[in-house]
Structures are given as structure tokens and as C-alpha cells.
Amino acid sequence: MPKITAAKVIVTSPGRNFVTLKIETDEGVYGLGDATLNGRELAVAAYLNDHVVPCLIGRDAHRIEDVWQFLYRGAYWRRGPVTMSAIAAVDTALWDIKGKLAGLPVYQLLGGACREGCMVYGHANGKTIEETIDNALHYQELGYKAIRLQSGVPGLNSTYGVSKDRYFYEPADADLPTENVWSTSKYMRSVPPLFDAARDALGWDVHLLHDVHHRLTPIEAGRLGRDLEPYRLFWMEDATPAEGQANFRLIRQHTTTPLAVGEIFNSIWDAKQLIEEQLIDYIRATVVHAGGISHLRKLASFADLYNVRTGCHGATDLSPVCMAAALHFGLSTTNFGIQEYMRHTEETDAVFPHHYRFADGLMHPGDAPGLGVDIDEELAAKYEYKRAYLPVNRLEDGTMFHW
Ligand code: GCO
Ligand code: MG
């Protein structure tokens, strides 16, 4: 049996913070797992260092499910983003090790490819509709089959999803949280014209997506979904906060626009009712925040019974290690729907050399044994952790609101 001999937590900030777990074995093979929790990175690093790593030493690296259950049931305190990101990192690293020892890419261990590649969506955004459409046309030229559109809201200074950079959307950019101002009525008026213009400019062969970022009440979301029906969206994301899963019943009663939710979920229990009652069409939980490849597979199999497909979160705060894991998962999961893809900066790509590739709107994890992603530790050590927060949001009268 390959015995775990060491595990270390690597914190690096090549443009943004990442936490990576590296598990070593006595067979000379190591595995990597992403443990990044945006804006709360050091909590997971401490959880791993202080409470998980000591329990790993000496264990059989092949017993992925047993280790998962040990960390989940054994902690007594179940679920939660910190715990589940830590467990995810261990789980992902162990799949990486198993693949390397078997000489196979992880997707082969998960049942093999169900498709040629994973359809991904890119992010087009701009301060104005024109700028957003211009950006979307560029993605179309690059071969993307699906594009998410976010545009500035007239009358508001800054809007979620509208980046300072053409390719990289990075909201966690301040030493203390930036405060933004929000108006639901201004926002609601601004979205249908964006998609109207988008269909005129981009045609009907491209999938269009939009992220509401948990900012509407269920009835407001129902109205927006209905207003967007003529533009046939691929999905409307995070229409309302999903802690109360039954909230989605009301949205469903009012619109046929497909619904996606779950980037902040960390367990199958967060989505149970949403899936069983078919209140959503896509589940966005992903490898790093939802307990790793093992737990996500259970979630996807459950979702498959209810016609819900996957649409994993893939923003820049999910490291290339998570991206690779998500692609192995997506390639081998029958009810895969789409994968979010926000390109990482060159600095990040240099710290995490990887085999995954993009062509014609699809991504493939590559055929290197394991996950096919590595970490250049010497380079990683050059980028020191830098505290960075996500912004917060207030209504125009100063009331604290959802970000
Ligand atoms: C998305 C997300 C991100 C998150 C970010 C939080 O759809 O990609 O909403 O932009 O806000 O990943 O860390
Ligand atoms: Mg989102």
C-alpha cells in the first residue's frame, strides 16, 4: 500500500491567493488538492495544518473513501465551507495519487470519457451594453459556444461581474472590503436590453448566461426570468439566496428560464430539496468547496435522477488544481452540463503548470497520469500571501445587502 508520509499546505499569491495541499507517499508519488476559500484562505490552511495533516500520516493513500469518511464523520462538526474545502483538498490529492500510481488520467478512473470535451463558458462584461457585446463577439471569435454576459447598471458606480480587465475578473482586490451600492430596480431594468442587443449581435447559435449573484427576492427573480424568456438563456444563475431552498418554488412558478445555483454550496444536503423538487436545472457546486471529487460525484448522481445537470463554479479563485479536477469530473459525468472557465493570469499558470487545454469551445483535462497539474514550489514561494477581501454591498439608503 502507498503510505502517506507527509502533507504540506502551500499558500501562494501569484496575482491572487491560493491554498494547495500536497500529499506525499512512500512510493515517491505525490498528489495535489486545491483548498482555496476566497477571502478566508488562512482559515482552511490552519484547519488543514492543525487538524487534518496529523491524521493523514501513515494512512493508505489508496483508501480515498475511507479517508473522506474519517475526516467528515470523525470531525463531529459536519459540513461548512472551511471543513469541506479542507476535505476536498485531501480527496483531490488522493485521486491525483491514485491516477499517477495507476498510470492513468483521473477521468479514466472515474469511468472514462462520456464526451469529447467539456463545454465551457467565458465571461464577457463591460461598463456599457456596447462594451459587453464587443467583448462577447471576441469570445465568439475564439470559438466559445457559451458566454456569460454582465453589464454595468446605469446609475450605479460599480456592478458585480464587471471587471477592470478584459479577461480576468478578480473581485477580491482590496486589503479591506470595498463598499458598493446596489439598486434592484435599476438593475432589473438594465438586463433585458442587454440580452436583446446580444441576440441581435451574436445570433441564436451561442448559449448566453447571466449571473444575478443572489440579489433578488424570489418574486423579483420570477419577473426577471420571465422578462428574459424571449432571449432563451442557457441559465439564470443565483437568482436568489438559496439557504431557503423552497424559495426556488416561487421562481419556478413564474418562469421557464433555466435556473442554476450552488457555487457556495458545500454538501449534497444544501441542494437536496432543490434537486428532488426539480426547482433548478443546473447545480454549480464544485470540487474545492463541496468535499472533492468523491462528494461531487455523489451529488451529480443524485441530480441525474431528477434531470439536473452540472455547471461547476470555475472563477479565478478556484486554482488550476481545481480546474483540472473539475474537468476530469466533467468529462466522465453523464449529466455534465457546462463548466465555468475564467482564465488565470500568466503568473498563476506558471506556478501551476497543467495539461488541460481549450479548443473549439471545449476543454479537455489531458491524458497525463493523475490530474495533470503540478506546482512549482520555488516559484510559489516567491509570491507571499496578501490579505484580500471580496467587496460588500449596501442599498442606496445604506442598508447592508447581499454581495
Ligand atoms: C461566478 C461567481 C464568482 C464569485 C467568486 C467568489 O459565477 O464565477 O459568482 O464571481 O463571486 O468566485 O469567490
Ligand atoms: Mg456566480
Image (cartoon, rainbow, N blue to C red):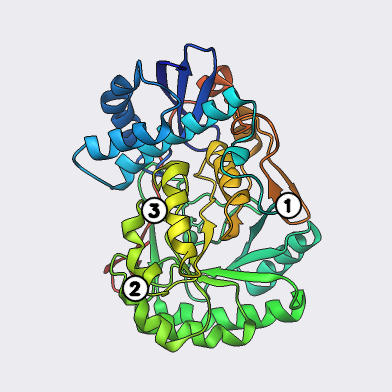
Q: How far apart are marks 3 and 2 (CA)?
A: 15 Å
- Quarter residue 6 falls in: top left
Image depth: mark 2 or mark 1 in front: 1
As helix, strand or loop, the secondary structure at mark 3 comes to: loop
As helix, strand or loop, the secondary structure at mark 2 comes to: loop
Instruction: Name the residue beneath numbered marker 1.
Output: 116
Q: In the rendered structure, are the residues bearing label 1 and label 3 in contact, judged by CB atoms less than 8 Å apart? A: no
| Residue in front for this viewpoint, 153 or 80 | 80
Q: Along the polypeptide, which appears first: circle 1 or circle 3?
A: 1
Q: Along the polypeptide, which appears first: circle 3 or circle 2?
A: 3
Instruction: Name the residue beneath numbered marker 2.
Output: 396
Q: How far apart are marks 2 and 1 (CA)?
A: 48 Å
Could you tell me the amino acid type at mark 3? Thr
Q: Residue 102, how many percent across, how many down?
A: 60, 26
Badge 2: few (under 14), some or many (20 or more) residues near its Cα, within 10 Å? Answer: few
157, above or below 386, in the image: below
Furthest-right residue in this view: 141
Quadrant into which the C terminus falls:
bottom left
Q: Residue at x 47, y 24 (%)?
A: 22
As helix, strand or loop, the secondary structure at mark 1 comes to: loop
Instruction: Name the residue beneath numbered marker 3.
Output: 178
Residue 208 — which label?
A: none
